[in-house]
Image (spheres, coloured by chain):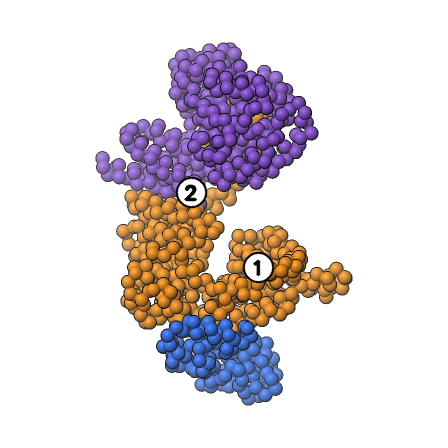
Amino acid sequence: MQVLNRKSFKLPFVGKDKFVRLTRVGLGYDGGSFHVRDNNNVEKIVDIISDVLGEKVSFFQTCVLCGQDFLCSGCRHQDLCPTKDLPLQCICENCRATPKLYDQYVKNLGSGKLASTELR
Amino acid sequence: MEQPENISMWVEKYRPKTLDEVVDLKSVVESLKAFLKTPKTMPHLLFAGMPGTGKTTIALCIARQLFGSSWRTFTLELNASDERGIKIVRERIKDFARYTRGAFGNIPYVIIILDESDQMTRQAQTALRRIMETSSNTCRFMLICNYSSKIIEPIQSRCAVFRFSMLDKENMVEHLGYISGKENVSLLPDAAEAIVEYSEGDLRRAINALQTASAYTKTKTVDKKAVLRVIGEASPKKVQLMLNKALGSDFVEARRMMYELMGQYGLSGSDIIRQVHREIFKVSHLTTEEKAELANIIGEYDFRLVEGANDDIQLSALLAQFSKFGKLREAGN
Amino acid sequence: MKDELMWVEKYRPKRIAEIVGNEEAKVSFVEWLRSNRWRKKAALLYGPPGVGKSALVHAAANELNFKIIEMNASDIRTEKAIGKIAGPATTFVALDKFSANTEGSLLFLDEVDGIFGVQDRGGVGAILKIFAQKKGRKEKKTKERKEIQGSQIPVVLAANDPDLRKLRPLRKVCHLIRFRKVRIPLIVVLLQKICLMEHVTAGFEALEAIARNSGGDVRSAINDLQTLSEGGEALRVQDVASLHPRNRSFDFADTLKGVFSAKSSQEAMSVLNSTTIDFDSLVLSIHDNLPLRCKDPVELGVAYDLLSKADVFRGRIGLENWRLLKYFFSLISQATTVSSQPFQPFDFIFPPMRIIALFWTKGKRVTLEALCAKIGARCHVSRRSAKLDFVPFIKAILKEDKSAPLGAWFQLDDKEMGHLMNMGRL
């Protein structure tokens, strides 16, 4: 199992065909490392990379509240989660116990913290 | 102008042309005649009464007497149940007023007859009130309805309201006798009696029944047998059948027939409910109390029909109540 | 019912940040809307129901000052209708630019899946046409073409279909934005907030159970929370057990089966909360199938009475009184659970009987209406009155006396005469 960070990760030589396919389904390349540019088809990205690496691939999760990276493997909802291991926003185990979570959530997003800098 | 002998429907042929020809409705006619002497003072009119009591006839008489032979030019006949929405009514009135404007001079105003105006929603009536206000210089409205209580207060207060009472038996027989005399048909007393009873105070129905019955006889004599044949022929058999199925607790079949009535005849929910209400009193195996109970249920669903979104659901619900009633009745016996 | 409003209405997000989950989609949408890219492509938001697609459009329009011209694609199905509203909107709304407080308008077509059925191919064409100028530019470089290239206002489409196959024709002209089911911890956060606002005491585990049960559908989770807290008591995990599990999507058969097999009205309510079928089709389908569930006439009478009351609420809801929706749902869920008999699966009646009944007989009705209009004009009565008070008599006279000049007097043509003579009795 290989864990990747959506903002930047390196891959071994993938070959022209796979490279074209990866960029087409939403992976960005900046000359040295890859990043997830478009989330619409991340399942396909995962499939192709798993194929390249010959092992299962999962992504770090980013906590919307504290910004920490964490893994799905510790989450008790992974049995039901249809987006398990995909590079999406979630809330880490530590933050789930925080009171007034929602207000904090709205504040974080509204003030442009974290991934949604583009929002404001 | 059509000559009287060319008119094939007796209701039209013998419709009075002037107020003087109207024999009943003395008090209504007298006050209207007063308006006709000084037409400028005539207010908007509201005629309320059950079907076939002469409301449309009187309205047409007034138009004829105001405008003479060119009355059609200056009279707009609208039927609220035929027009799709108040916007169209407004447009038609506007167009009509514009179209006739050039002809003014010796004519004080044009007349708009709006039949079945109690079929309009409250919102539509409010809009109508505004139309009446803005066009009051050029138009007089004659609103015709069954129940004046369904007309909003602001409209009623702008109109002179006339109530048309149901024709009594003697008057009805007299009318039928007059017409059959003109048509060289002899109407036997028991036949006249049967027509009167069938028509429930609706003269239009009575005359239509008389004409149909006379078509059935070769001998120019209308007897009771002919009348009963007409009643059988003109009765809403499908509605009766639907009613019987429902009361016999065969709801699914009753509902199928309801869809047939809606689909093939384009009857609306309120049309069907009105028919059902009329027919329920003719169901022979029910007691008077039971009929009253069913009539109550019909009233409730008639009310919901107006409030609700879906005619088919309300009607089906009514049929389901009949099925329930039938089932409980059967269990009680 | 202790609350006037449905919570999904009450807590409808006003700002983008208030929508939970789908951060990436939110960013992508706002970027598209703020740049000029909307001139060249429409935005297509696609994903499962209840995750915030139309909430995002409304919140974004609110924050970025767009006026939404909303069209429910299931209402207006033909190319012509779409062209009429969307076409002029894209070419003429430039005028709006002069108004001070708004950057302009935004055309929002919700539930576009509805217009991609086989019979509605034209609908795709209409949406494609709005962005067709791009193609035109390549083909002919005439001046007029250049002037109108691109859309004058942003066009946003939303589709419930999670996979895009059905929407293939649109992909070329759309900026695709995918929505996913919202993750359970994020739903819990929102439910906690609502509990706080509504003074509902609920255990964390109970909220987690609701969120887990929702299958990532935020709207249904909020509805379930409201249903469960109607009792006014503290919410425990075991209360959540009465909820109907959310399937991936509730189509007609699922929904009908769900409401008719429910053991309590609360269970039926939870099915209704999660259905994606529009209310009017839903209520007609329940009406069609109710007699198959309630075989006993007495029970059927009770059930239909409730359905009739629900329909009265539907009438009152009209287009704006959405706060009455909960009474509507409540009455329907009571109606479908009247029967004391255990649920036996049956074949559902579909499509609605009403549509079948009215479809096959349209020609007959049109002729009858035309004929009644002629009678009405002659005899000063409405078409309805002509139909009920004249047609039976006229028919009887003509049957007896074929030479009667009635047809000529009413100016009936051969088709109308034929219909009159051959129509069945009322």
Q: Which chain is blue?
A: A
Which residue is rendered at x = 43% and y = 47% of the image? C316
Q: CA distance from mark 1 to mark 2?
A: 33 Å
Label 2 resides on the chain identified as B
Closer to us: C106 or A60: C106
Label 1 resides on the chain identified as C
Element type at marker 2? helix
The image shows residue B207 at horizontal and vertical percentages of 48, 20
The hue of chain B in the figure is purple
Which residue is rendered at x = 50% and y = 77% of the image? A113
Which residue is rendered at x = 54% and y = 24% of the image? B59
The image shows residue C250 at horizontal and vertical percentages of 42, 60
Residue C243 in view of the camera: yes
Which residue is rendered at x = 34% and y = 41% of the image? B320
Number of other residues with Cα within 10 Å of mark 1, as a class: few under 14, some 14 to 19, many 20 or more? some
Element type at marker 1? strand
The quadrant in which residue C44 appears is bottom right
The image shows residue C113 at horizontal and vertical percentages of 53, 60
Report which residue position mark 2 lands on. B307
Q: Amino acid at mark 2?
A: Glu
Quadrant of the image for the C terminus of chain C?
top left
Report which residue position mark 1 lands on. C67
Q: Which chain is orange?
A: C
Closer to us: B8 or B169: B169
Q: Amino acid at mark 1?
A: Lys
